[in-house]
Amino acid sequence: MAYSKEIFETAQEIITARRSRAERDAQHRRKAFGLEEPRYPDLQNEIIRSTRDLMRTIGQGEKAKEIIEQSRVKHRTLTRSIADLLAEHGYPEDYLEVHPTCPICQDYGFVETRYCECFTNLLKKLTFDEAAKRTPLQCSRFADFSLHYYTDEQREHMQGIFDYCKGYADTFDRDSYSLLFYGETGLGKTHLSLSIAGELISKGWYVMYDSTQSIMNQLEREHFGKGTGDDYEKLLLECDLLIMDDLGTEFSTQFTLAEFYNILNSRLLSNRPTIISTNLDLKGIENKYTKRIASRIVGEYELLHFVGNDIRQQKKEEE
Ligand SMILES: [Zn+2]
């Protein structure tokens, strides 16, 4: 799985901050406990001293063995005494230790040479947040999708689309179909594509979601050297699922046409599913993007026609 550089760096910052906070908190507890129980700093100093003695034995061969053993016994006695003091004051035995958010990796983000689960979960969460930030529907989940706003006939049709999308998310794989969500504005296309995104991200798939306009802007910046050189295009071509929202509303140029065809074609050839949502109908796609592009979509994509009356408008009227 590939994540964008920003997401990766943010995740590392968060993990480092967690570790620092846990260490700081432990230091505060030690300091406060020292004020509460004056015998504690003395014991603590002795531990530090005995550790220092132990360091000095390095390179002293046979002689060191004895010192190490003595020091180990001493260390055990001192730790026991501190535990007793803590108990006297009603604190648990590990009260003065560092309490990391993740006990598996101690907030380092990795265990041996592998990323810890806490780190990969954080990457998934940040990716989802990033996707959710770009849309007015903050919490698009399947559970929030309402069929309340449709006529009986529309409802039956949309129930079919809903079930299809739910099934798609449940069984998603590299050989899943690419989908075209088409139909007028406000019929739940973004909601369902984000619902799919959310489910897949929580399962660890790498999903990229953005409006087509924003995708094209970023490609343009990268292509014409105004960006950070982040290889955004590579991510677009290689992510497990790419969702291009609102196709047709972007300003189109020769560059965007070529890029769109490239994304479409490369992802089909490398068996990577894409979901495109658009307010255009099939004829509209042909007019705006050429026959070649339209026939690639019609031939290779599963076409889902969204019907109904603008949900956002109806919700507004009910308020
Ligand atoms: Zn961890």
Image (cartoon, rainbow, N blue to C red):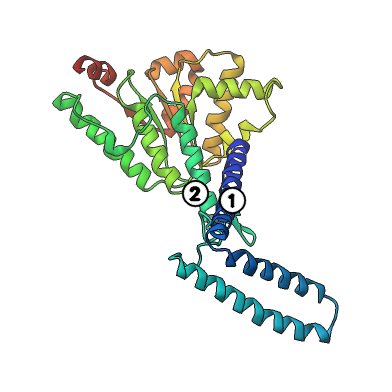
Asked which secondary structure carries label 1, the reply is helix
How far from the left and from the top, in percent, is residue 253? 58, 13
Residue at figure coordinates x 46%, y 13% from the top left: 287
Q: Which mark is residue 251?
A: none
Ranked by sequence position, the earlier of labels 2 and 1 is 1
Say what amino acid the circle numbered 1 marks.
Arg
Question: Quick check: 38 above or below 10?
Answer: below
Q: Determine which residue is flagged by label 1.
A: 24
In the displayed structure image, the side of residue 310 where residue 148 appears, left or right: left
Q: Which residue is nearer to you in this view: 200 or 241?
A: 200
Question: Quadrant holding ligand 1?
Answer: bottom right
* Real-space Cα separation, disc 2 to disc 1, in angstroms: 24 Å
Q: Which mark is residue 121?
A: 2
Q: Which residue is nearer to you in this view: 55 or 41?
A: 41
Residue at figure coordinates x 56%, y 30% from the top left: 263
Question: Quick check: 85 above or below 158?
Answer: below
Residue at figure coordinates x 71%, y 83% from the top left: 70
Q: Quadrant of residue 187?
A: top left
Say whether residue 222 is visible: yes
How far from the left and from the top, in percent, is residue 50? 72, 73
* Mark 2 touches mark 1? (CB < 8 Å): no
How far from the left and from the top, in percent, is residue 53? 77, 73
